[in-house]
């Protein structure tokens, strides 16, 4: 069985190998990226803005003032109606990652549809 000193020596050797590989492949990777940038017409400005030509628009911002009276920009968000309700009253809109409570229930053999919130019929129309 290897002792701690041998393992640390192996780690050091592997880290050195990884560093050498990274150094060797760096220039090649940069050339590949530049070639793709040229092929697609991507500029540094495109990369710095964080959005490409096919990217979705950023959420609108709303100016509000904080307690000091200075204006602060906040993203405007609209409330999303819950689509799923758990046995302990937890809710989920169906957007984003599946919450742990629902993932655990699905792992137990349940289906998401069992926890779907049924919309009430509109009797007033």
Image (cartoon, rainbow, N blue to C red):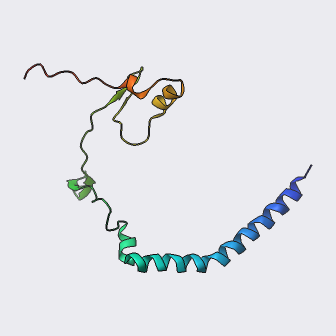
Nearer the observer, 14 or 39 = 39
* Res. 40 visible in picture: yes
Q: Is residue 28 above or below residue 103?
A: below
Residue 60 appears left or right of 13: left
Q: Position of residue 121 (x, y in %)?
A: 18, 21
* Res. 42 visible in picture: no
Residue 62 appears left or right of 112: left
Q: Position of residue 1 (x, y in %)?
A: 92, 49
Residue positioned 30% across, 59% down in the render? 56
Count of number-bearing discs: 0
Q: Is residue 61 above or below residue 40?
A: above
Residue positioned 90% across, 52% down in the render? 2
Q: Position of residue 81 (x, y in %)?
A: 27, 34
Nearer the observer, 61 or 87 = 87
Residue positioned 35% across, 65% down in the render? 51
Question: Quick one: which residue is furthest to the right in this view?
Answer: 1
Give the quadrant of the C terminus.
Answer: top left
Nearer the observer, 52 or 15 = 52
Q: Position of residue 55 (x, y in %)?
A: 32, 62
Q: Is residue 15 above or below residue 39?
A: above
Question: Quick one: which residue is furthest to the left in this view?
Answer: 125
Residue 47 in which image quadrant? bottom left
Q: Is residue 1 above or below residue 121?
A: below
Residue 116 in which image quadrant? top left
Residue positioned 48% across, 79% down in the render? 34
């Amino acid at each position: 069985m290897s002792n701690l000193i041998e393992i640390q020596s192996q780690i050091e050797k592997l880290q050195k190998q990884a560093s050498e590989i990274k150094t060797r492949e760096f220039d090649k990777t940069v050339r590949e990226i530049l070639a793709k940038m040229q092929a697609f017409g991507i500029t540094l400005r495109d990369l710095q803005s964080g959005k490409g030509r096919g990217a979705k628009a950023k959420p609108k911002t709303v100016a509000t003032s904080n307690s000091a009276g200075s204006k602060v920009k906040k993203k405007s968000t609209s409330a999303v109606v819950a689509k799923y309700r758990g046995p302990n009253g937890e809710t989920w809109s169906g957007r984003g990652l599946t919450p742990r409570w629902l993932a655990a229930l699905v792992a137990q053999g349940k289906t998401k549809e069992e926890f779907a919130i049924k919309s009430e019929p509109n009797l007033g129309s």
